[in-house]
Image (cartoon, rainbow, N blue to C red):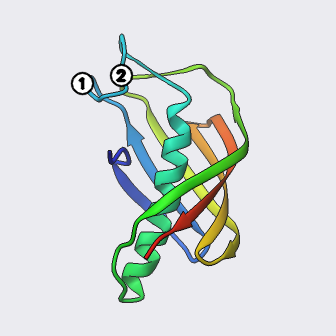
């Protein structure tokens, strides 16, 4: 399921994406979303980074997988419908096809989650 709404920025080592949950989105319950959904937003932002980097090099899209995380710090338990979340994934290590990203999610100036994820890109 694609959750990211838009890519706002992309560099060689980082990607910024945006997400606003709306009523009717599959993870919305009583107008709120568990902050744990941010882990998937981190993974999809890392995937957007890989995908766009491949596209601008003339390659094709490929599948990928979230391998795991050692730590995710959440400063909230829930996210309200309508709040725009900015997700930044910065690649800190890459041994193709695997990479590690330090990620941060914010709503306005408020950090709602930080963590590091490990991902693998397929062929």
Task: Write down the residue under mark 1.
Answer: 24
Pick out the residue farthest to the left.
Answer: 24
Q: Where is residue 112 in the image (x, y as percent from the top left)?
A: 62, 32
Say which element carries label 2: loop
Q: Residues within 10 Å of mark 2 (few under 14, many from 20)?
A: some
Say which element carries label 1: loop
Q: In this view, does 100 lie above or below 28?
A: below
Q: In the shown orientation, is residue 48 left or right of residue 89?
A: left
The mark found on residue 28 in the picture is 2
Asked if labels 1 and 2 touch by Cβ distance under 8 angstroms, the answer is: yes
Task: Residue 89: name its quadrant.
Answer: bottom right
Residue drawn at x 52%, y 52% is 43
Q: In the shown orientation, is residue 118 left or right of residue 28?
A: right
Task: Residue 28: name its quadrant.
Answer: top left
Residue drawn at x 42%, y 71% is 51
Q: Residues within 10 Å of mark 1 (few under 14, many from 20)?
A: few
Task: Residue 29: name its quadrant.
Answer: top left
Q: Where is residue 50 in the image (x, y as percent from the top left)?
A: 48, 70
Q: In this view, does 65 lie above or below 91?
A: above
């Amino acid at each position: 399921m694609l959750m990211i709404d838009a890519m706002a920025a992309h560099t060689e080592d980082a990607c910024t994406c945006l997400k606003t949950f709306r009523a009717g989105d599959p993870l919305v319950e009583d107008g709120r979303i568990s902050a744990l959904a941010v882990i998937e937003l981190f993974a999809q932002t890392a995937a957007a980074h890989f995908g766009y980097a491949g596209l601008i090099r003339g390659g094709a899209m490929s599948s990928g997988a979230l391998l795991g995380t050692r730590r995710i710090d959440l400063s909230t338990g829930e996210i309200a419908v309508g709040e725009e979340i900015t997700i930044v994934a910065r690649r800190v290590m890459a041994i193709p096809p695997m990479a590690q990203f330090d990620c941060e999610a914010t709503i306005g100036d408020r950090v709602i989650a930080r963590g590091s994820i490990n991902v693998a890109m397929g062929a």
